[in-house]
Image: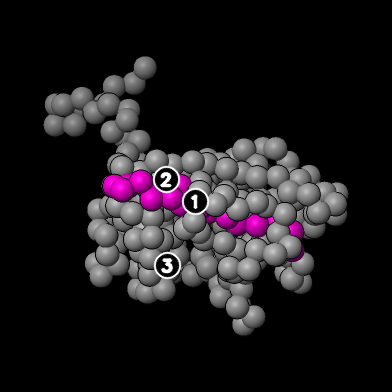
Amino acid sequence: MVKFLKDGVEVDSVALLKIEAARARYMMSLLMRKLGPKGMSEIFADEIAAHAADEMKWHKQSNGKLAGSVAHADVAEGSAQDFIDWFWAGYGGPNVPAMLRSHPEHLGGIPQPDGRLVVFEVPGHSRNPAHLYLRPTKDWSGVPVPLDPQMPHRIMARLESREGELIGAILHEFAEKSPGFKARFSVHWPAATPNELLRGHIDHLMIEWNNWIRMYLQTRSQNVDLMPIALKCGL
């Protein structure tokens, strides 16, 4: 058991963890400002290649079947469509660095000439950073993941190999509660993906969407500097 005092007042372990988390977010923002996703990609080139090789191995073993990482949320304020609009506006404007700080393992987004987006992160709280090729879409044909008609507000993307082959899906679904909303966040991987990654990505989803939702509830707008909020959100 360890006890720390600051100005004669005991600082408990939870308070220390919050300080640590805030400084870790700051350090990641500093690294991203210095290196950017291109610089980070160069540093982690071997790890990115290793994940890509594993990804294709799991895909070939899965015979087109998928397995999901799914997290649910119940939000007492705001609205589903308002939150989705806030989310997209955040990634379309100057608050991108702050939006990325919703999870410490977010390493950047890299738009592709063919309309896809490379999401650069460590998936599933696993070992290696990865380039995840997402193709945002409203056309769900050919994706073996059912849509929930009771959750009509959606963020949808095909998860593809670098060469463009369908290997998974991103499906985030929302329903209004008035006030508030319900959400089902899901990423669907090749079925042969290790269970540790599948389960770990549930934790990843909860962390990032918890922070995004809290940032939204504090601001309801992207016309503010989100970084001071992102660095201490939820702490």
Nearest to the observer: residue 2 or residue 135: 135
Residue 79 position within the rendered picture, expressed as x and y whole percent measured from the top left: 33, 54
The single residue placed furthest to the front in the displayed view is 149
| Amino acid at circle 3 | Trp
Query: SS class of the residue under badge 1?
Result: loop
**Which residue is identified by label 3?**
88
Residue at the image position 31 percent from the left and 48 percent from the top: 178
Nearest to the observer: residue 40 or residue 154: 154
The span picked out in magenta is: 166-183
Q: CA distance from mark 2 to mark 1?
A: 8 Å
- For residue 75, which quarter of the picture? top left
Among numbered discs 3 and 2, the one appearing first in the sequence: 3
Query: Is residue 182 left or right of 230 when viewed as pictured?
Result: right
Task: Give above or below for 43 relative to 122.
Answer: below
**Viewer can see residue 215:** no
| Label 2 crowd bin: few (<14), some (14–19), many (20+), radius 10 Å | some
**Which residue is identified by label 2?**
182
Task: Give above or below for 198 relative to 10.
Answer: below
| Amino acid at circle 2 | Lys
Quadrant showing the C terminus: top left
Query: SS class of the residue under badge 3?
Result: helix
**Viewer can see residue 132:** yes
Residue at the image position 73 percent from the left and 49 percent from the top: 66
Residue 40 position within the rendered picture, expressed as x and y whole percent measured from the top left: 56, 65
Query: SS class of the residue under badge 2?
Result: strand
Determine which of the numbered discs, if any, sits on residue 151 in the image.
1
Among numbered discs 1 and 3, the one appearing first in the sequence: 3
Among numbered discs 2 and 1, the one appearing first in the sequence: 1
